């Protein structure tokens, strides 16, 4: 699922599952987390190696395949988790830290005026917007806010317990919240209500603000732009300058 979680675990469907996961290429225009055998369109790799889409679909072998959502309203449990796996892999490679990626999305790509991004309650996005970009990126941001709140040790324990205890089952948001509260010994309803169901950009809590203050100021963000660009492009998103000079993402597209 991530370099921290998957590296120490067997594939959920047997030892050979990940060995064959990247060899089946079809001209579909999308990637899909087909159980034990994810498929990738060659178009993803025309410009060279791409780890983001491979990490995303392999993460789905746990979150999406081994753990299937009970109802589609909980789809952020699939797409938000797989997107956050991309963030963790980027950090593992040294491309950009999870804090830097979160900060870049929150302050540069999706500022408060990006209302078309923030107006979707991803905890129940509705049938027409199940695979819109906020489900992916806000889902990942929700997980990072959780991580900042509970700390690295409890966060990684939550991920491991989630994929282990729920393996082969159907999952819901309430079940994930209950596990996170059990592991962290914290009341987290307000955090999840805010990040999953608000229709405006949430204010950062104290833990998130502290994490943002730890990011070096005045440092070039080009390495972060380079790290997130493939993630945005895969969902049909691009950059445009907002009135305040910040970068806004535009467009939405389905992806898996």
Image (cartoon, rainbow, N blue to C red):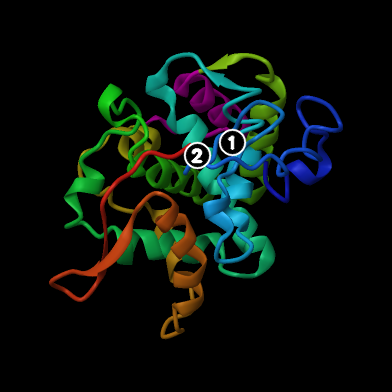
Tag shown at residue 184: 1
Q: Residue at the spot x=50%, y=62% of the render? A: 99
Quadrant showing the N terminus: top right
Indicate the position of residue 86 as horizontal and vertical percent values.
57, 52
Q: Residue at the spot x=78%, y=38% of the render? A: 20
Indicate the position of residue 232 as horizontal and vertical percent values.
41, 56
Q: In the picture shown, does residue 214 fall above or below 92?
A: below
Q: Which residues are magenta?
A: 172-189
Q: Residue tagged by mark 2?
A: 28
* Whether residue 217 can be seen here: yes
Q: Identify which residue, 99 or 150, lies in the foreground.
A: 99
The residue furthest front is 27
Q: In the image, is 86 to the left or to the right of 243?
A: right
Q: In the picture shown, does residue 141 fall above or below 161?
A: below
Mark 1 vs mark 2, foreground winner is 2
Quarter location, residue 126: top left
Q: Secondary structure at mark 2?
A: loop
Q: Main secondary structure of the magenta part?
A: helix
Sequence order check: which comes first, mark 1 or mark 2? Answer: 2
Indicate the position of residue 51 as horizontal and vertical percent values.
63, 56
Q: Residue at the spot x=59%, y=36% of the render? A: 184
């Amino acid at each position: 699922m991530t370099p921290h979680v998957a590296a120490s675990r067997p594939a959920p469907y047997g030892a050979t599952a990940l060995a064959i996961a990247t060899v089946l290429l079809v001209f579909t225009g999308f990637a899909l987390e087909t159980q034990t055998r994810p498929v990738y369109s060659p178009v993803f790799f025309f410009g060279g190696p791409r780890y983001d889409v491979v990490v995303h679909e392999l993460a789905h072998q746990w979150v999406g395949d081994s753990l299937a959502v009970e109802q589609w309203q909980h789809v952020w449990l699939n797409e938000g988790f797989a997107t956050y796996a991309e963030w963790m892999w980027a950090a593992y490679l040294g491309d950009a830290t999870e804090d830097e990626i979160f900060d870049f999305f929150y302050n540069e790509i999706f500022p408060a005026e990006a209302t078309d991004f923030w107006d979707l309650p991803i905890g129940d996005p509705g049938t027409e917007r199940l695979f819109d970009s906020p489900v992916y990126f806000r889902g990942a941001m929700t997980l990072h806010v959780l991580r900042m709140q509970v700390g690295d040790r409890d966060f990684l324990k939550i991920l491991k317990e989630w994929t282990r205890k729920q393996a082969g089952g159907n999952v819901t948001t309430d079940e994930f919240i209950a596990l996170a509260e059990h592991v962290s010994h914290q009341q987290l309803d307000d955090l999840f209500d805010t990040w999953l169901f608000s229709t405006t950009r949430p204010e950062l809590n104290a833990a998130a603000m502290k994490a943002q203050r730890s990011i070096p100021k005045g440092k070039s963000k080009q390495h972060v732009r380079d790290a997130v660009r493939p993630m945005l492009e895969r969902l049909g998103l691009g950059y445009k300058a907002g009135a305040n000079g910040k970068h806004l993402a535009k467009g939405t597209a389905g992806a898996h």
